[in-house]
């Protein structure tokens, strides 16, 4: 028994001596200069302390450091923390060494000196992270900033870096506005961050609004490309855009978006060789590429859709071309400076759809090419079957100096079946007929609203075999006036309506307007207000040219006929609006009897 007590007393003495010796050893080695040098060598960069280190044995041997300022190599980043607790390896104390084994920083502020996407910044951050990941490091703080301002752009954050053999993991969270973003990264080898080793890589970024996941491997360190699968998903693209400072007009579109596929990513580019895009229920497959670029981001790719439903985007598309809606002034792409919109990115997209749906319209196959480069935008819609006919269009916006842009747009429609066209408030559509037109617009301005407000252009129109209910409104009134008086037919046929319009601002000058119905030909010229669609036309009601075949003879376009002058017909006026025109006798120049 005495021997056991002696052994226990000896053990206690040894522990006490070791503790005192360890404390004295640590106390001797913890001068501020020594600790700063040791931490800088272990973690990288330059670390400075505001005061003298303190030794704590409360939860194992540790150094308590106050007022820590940790700066990355070349000043790429700076982390200021109220306190750091550096754990000391107890085993090292028995060997007479003070080895720091873990690091915890509290009350931190992180500042990135430059744009993360700038040349060399990502590579430098990778080298820094590789060294830091070699030790257990935990950081918690209340703000992250970057660029010229040190005002926090992100809120509370927490990081945990843990080595695992040759690899390591990074886990954490950060508050971004009203979203808490959780992230993790797992590396099979820390040399992946420096381009000196290969191995598996897994990344996950998840928030209530969106998520991104990547699983792959770096196979060739020299190429610095991670090959694998990628998946980006958001349940509210509109809300995500708002949180990045962008506002999308309209209400119904831009909801769920998912981009997934297999490909490769490096420090500046993501390529999906097999990509799948899902947007509001529309599914396209093909190839996509995203590049940060030296001046602006770049998006390119080719996607094929079996079906694409544009109905949810008609509000946005309508606002772009000037269709009024309930969108508040200033909350439309029409009112935003084109210089900011068109110079924000470069785009080269080729989209095709076997079938498309746009509200009441449907058709296909169709293909759209969208090219945006250096602020020069071109859009090309290939010839597309729609409404029993075909439609093709082109548009281009190019810089014209300063903040102004030139617009040139053309649309050509051939033999559209009016029965398949949506109803229009500004004009009563016939029960049947074929519509052919060519529309060109040109203009200049800093916004689409300014361009369309004073744009010029030309319109050539041909409406064939248009049938209206007898006594109906709009063009049927002209057909009835130009037809036989007292006709009781169930419908009236406007065999042909053709004309040419020249647009300038809010007015269209109409010329060579001809309406052929029954036994009469109506020839008109004048103007149409594009603001309220009011008409002011003057012309003549003439007998039907002998050479003009009727609608039942198989051709709606009459053959060339001898010219007829106003003196051969009845002078008439057309007043009212395009929806409710009135055909009146022209009494100009007639005096009282």
Image (tube, grey):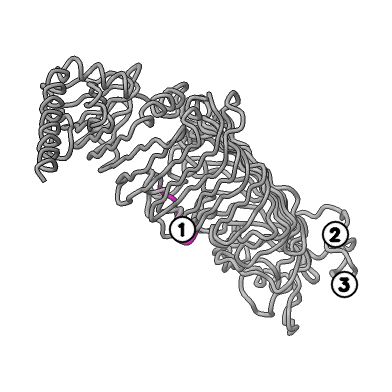
| Horizontal side, residue 398 vs residue 326: left or right | right
Magenta part, dominant SS = loop
Q: Is residue 528 above or below residue 402?
A: below
**Cβ–Cβ under 8 Å for marks 3 and 1:** no
Residue 459 visible from this viewpoint: yes
Q: Is residue 252 magenta?
A: yes
Q: Secondary structure at mark 1?
A: loop
> What residue would you read off at disc 1?
235
As drawn, 133 above or below 335: above
Examine the rendered structure and indicate whether residue 516 appears above or below residue 93. below
Residue 552, label in figure: 3
Residue 543 in which image quadrant = bottom right
Cα separation between marks 1 and 2: 57 Å
Say whether marks 1 and 2 touch (CB < 8 Å): no
Question: Where does the C terminus fall, quadrant-wise?
Answer: bottom right
Image coordinates for residue 504, horizontal then vertical, percent? 56, 43
Q: Position of residue 83 (x, y in %)?
A: 16, 32
Residue holding disc 2: 558
**Mark 2 crowdedness (10 Å alpha carbons): few <14, some 14-19, many ≥20:** some
* Magenta-drawn segment: 247-253
């Amino acid at each position: 028994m005495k021997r056991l007590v002696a052994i226990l007393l000896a053990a206690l003495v040894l522990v006490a001596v070791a503790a005192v010796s360890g404390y004295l050893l640590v106390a001797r080695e913890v001068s501020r200069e020594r600790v700063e040098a040791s931490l800088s060598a272990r973690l990288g960069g330059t670390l400075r302390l505001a005061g003298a280190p303190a030794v704590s044995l409360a939860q194992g041997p540790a150094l308590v450091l106050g007022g820590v300022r940790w700066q990355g190599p070349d000043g790429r980043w700076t982390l200021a923390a109220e306190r750091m607790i550096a754990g000391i390896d107890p085993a090292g104390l028995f060997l007479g060494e003070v080895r720091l084994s873990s690091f915890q920083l509290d009350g931190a502020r992180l500042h990135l000196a430059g744009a993360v996407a700038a040349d060399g910044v990502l590579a430098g951050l990778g080298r820094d992270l590789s060294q830091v990941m070699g030790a257990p490091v935990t950081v918690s703080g209340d703000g992250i900033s970057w660029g010229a301002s040190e005002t926090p752009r992100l809120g509370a954050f927490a990081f945990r870096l843990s080595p695992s053999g040759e690899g390591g993991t990074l886990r954490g969270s950060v508050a971004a506005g009203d979203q808490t973003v959780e992230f993790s990264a797992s590396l099979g080898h820390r040399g992946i961050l420096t381009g000196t080793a290969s191995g598996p890589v897994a990344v996950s970024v998840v928030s209530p609004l969106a998520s991104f996941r990547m699983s792959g491997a770096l196979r060739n360190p020299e190429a610095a490309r991670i090959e694998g699968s990628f998946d980006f998903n958001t349940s509210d693209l509109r809300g995500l855009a708002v949180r990045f400072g962008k506002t999308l007009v309209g209400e119904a579109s831009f909801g769920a978006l998912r981009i997934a596929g297999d490909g490769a990513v490096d420090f500046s580019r993501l390529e999906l060789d097999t990509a799948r895009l899902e947007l509001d229920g529309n599914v396209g497959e093909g190839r996509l590429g995203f590049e940060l670029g030296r001046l602006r981001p770049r998006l390119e790719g080719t996607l094929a859709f079996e079906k694409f439903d544009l109905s949810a985007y008609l509000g946005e598309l309508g606002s772009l071309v000037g269709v009024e809606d309930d969108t508040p002034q200033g909350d439309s792409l029409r009112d935003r400076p084109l210089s900011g919109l068109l110079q924000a990115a470069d785009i080269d997209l080729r989209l095709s759809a076997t079938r498309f749906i746009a509200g009441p319209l449907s058709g296909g196959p169709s293909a759209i090419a969208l090219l945006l480069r250096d602020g020069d935008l071109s859009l090309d819609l290939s010839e597309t079957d729609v409404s029993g006919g075909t439609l093709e269009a082109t548009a281009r916006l190019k810089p014209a100096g300063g903040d102004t842009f030139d617009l040139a747009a053309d649309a050509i429609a051939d033999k559209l079946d009016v029965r398949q066209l949506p109803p229009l408030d500004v004009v009563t559509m016939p029960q049947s007929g074929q519509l052919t037109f060519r529309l060109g617009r040109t203009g200049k301005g800093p916004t689409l609203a300014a361009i369309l407000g004073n744009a010029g252009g030309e319109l050539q129109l041909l409406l064939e075999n248009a049938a209206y209910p007898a006594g109906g409104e709009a063009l049927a009134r002209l057909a009835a006036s130009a037809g036989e008086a007292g006709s009781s037919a169930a419908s009236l046929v406007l065999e042909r309506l053709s004309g040419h319009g020249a647009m300038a601002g809010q007015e269209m000058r109409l010329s060579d307007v001809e309406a052929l119905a029954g036994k009469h030909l109506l020839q008109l010229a004048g103007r149409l207000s594009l603001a309220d669609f009011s008409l002011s036309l003057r012309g003549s009601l003439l007998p039907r040219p002998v050479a003009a075949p009727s609608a039942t003879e198989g051709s709606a376009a009459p053959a060339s006929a001898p010219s007829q002058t106003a003196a051969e017909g009845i002078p008439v006026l057309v007043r009212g609006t395009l929806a409710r025109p009135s055909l009146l006798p022209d009494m100009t120049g007639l005096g009282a009897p």
